[in-house]
Amino acid sequence: MGFLHMHAAVSLALASVLWTVQLVIYPAFRFIDPLHFSHWHTRYSGAITWIVAPLILIQTAGVAGRLFLLPAPDKLWAVECFFTTLAWTVTFVFSVPIHNRLQKARDEKAMGALVLTNWARTASWSATAVCSWLASGQA
């Protein structure tokens, strides 16, 4: 399996995790007992980091690595860079602060904001998966 195929596999795995979080995990937050929410959220955040962080870092490294494999940057790479940057920006500007609020207490408004802003992350990581999948087909 070549570099582009491995990059596509990681990108698809990351997109799959984001869709699971968006459609299953975040909506389930509302069913967690408010008295236990902070403890549960702390454990959830720690556990999901072990899954998401390596995928995000490897995917981002793959985007950077693609630059060195290309004779010149192409449009597909530029689109993937844009969406990777957008996903990281939304993560640090919105998602991390919202999760920090939820660490302290269950907050319906924060949970709604998390679901809403996570659509941008889900769409962005999905777009990077499509780009990397298309690039792997050109190999």
Image: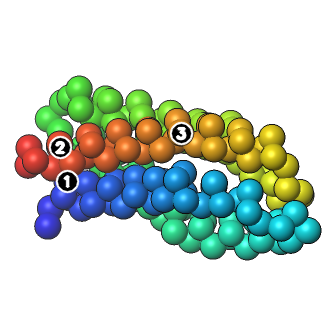
Q: Which percent across, then down, holds residue 38?
A: 85, 65
The residue pinned by badge 1 equals 4
Q: Answer with the quarter of the image where residue 82 lies.
A: top left
The residue pinned by badge 3 equals 119
Q: Which percent across, then down, holds residue 20?
A: 48, 59
Q: Answer with the quarter of the image where residue 10 lies.
A: bottom left
Q: Secondary structure at mark 3?
A: helix
At a point 32% along the width and 56% down the height, the residue shown is 12
Indicate which label's residue lies in the foreground, 3 or 2: 3
| In-image side of 18 versus 28 (left or right) | left
Can residue 97 be seen here? The reply is: no
Q: Secondary structure at mark 2?
A: helix
Q: Which percent across, then down, holds residue 73?
A: 23, 30
Can residue 118 be seen here? The reply is: yes
Mark 1 packing: few (<14 Cα in 10 Å), some, or many (20+)? Answer: many
Q: Earlier in the sequence, mark 1 or mark 2?
A: 1
The residue pinned by badge 2 equals 135
Q: Secondary structure at mark 1?
A: helix
* Circles 1 and 2 in contact, beta carbons < 8 Å: yes
At a point 69% along the width and 65% down the height, the residue shown is 45
Q: Earlier in the sequence, mark 3 or mark 2?
A: 3
Most foreground residue, 59 or 115: 115
Q: Gap between marks 1 and 3, in whole Å?
A: 26 Å
